[in-house]
Amino acid sequence: MLAFASFCAADEPATEIPPKTDTGISVADFQYGGVWKPKGAMLSGTLLPPPALDAITLTLTDESYEVTVTGEDHSDKGIYMLDETVSPMRMAIKSTSGPNQGRIILAIYEIKGKDAMRVCYDLSGSSFPKEFKAPKGSGLYLAGYRRQKPESSDNQRSGPKQDRTKVIDEE
């Protein structure tokens, strides 16, 4: 993964073995890329209502992100860097365009299986959160994300699926 830049100096000792998720998946094998939707979130002690959660979409590639909110005419885009050598793992997010342009947001995260992760952001960018909590007045944003499954072309076709096992077996 990406190394942390000088603005994200680690103050905790590194571990020698990449951590594993709660389902035994190695962090080194985890794929961050994809479309993610928050399934629950709290901002400074206040739970976000389901309509707000439904409006948010996070799209990740190996190095960049985009956050879109349904009904808004702009998105927030930028890059992120990971530090998987500390516990909890850390993320530094730098917005390059949108409402947070030029800001750096520091976060901690954990992988919760191959299609789920939890992230706690310090929206002030002053320090990495210490735990996965967002108490009242903290300025912390805690979100649980689920990866969205891509629509396959088979799901978009009408009619029954062709049984391809017979074709393979006969060849």
Image (spheres, rainbow, N blue to C red):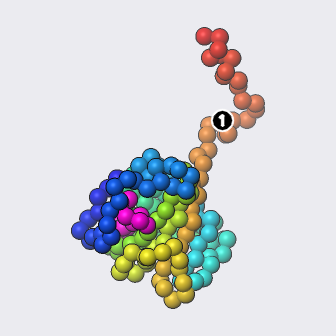
Residue 18, position in %: x, y?
40, 53
Front residue of this view, candidates 4 and 67 = 4
**Residue situated furthest top in the rendering:** 171
For the stretch drawn in magenta, the main secondary structure is strand
Q: Is residue 29 magenta?
A: no
Does residue 159 appear left or right of residue 16 in this picture?
Answer: right
The residue pinned by badge 1 equals 154
Front residue of this view, candidates 8 and 57 = 8
Residue kind at label 1, given as amino acid type? Asp
Point 60% across, 82% down: residue: 46
Front residue of this view, candidates 137 and 153 = 137
Residue 92, position in %: x, y?
36, 67
Point 48% across, 75% down: residue: 131
Quarter of the rendering containing residue 57: bottom right
Q: In this rendering, does residue 67 appear at all?
A: no
Residue 147, position in %: x, y?
56, 54
Q: Which residues are magenta?
A: 84-96
Q: In this rendering, does residue 154 appear at all?
A: yes
Quarter of the rendering containing residue 83: bottom left
Quarter of the rendering containing residue 158: top right
Q: Is residue 60 above or below residue 165?
A: below
- Quarter of the image for the C terminus: give it: top right
Q: Is residue 133 above or below residue 108?
A: below
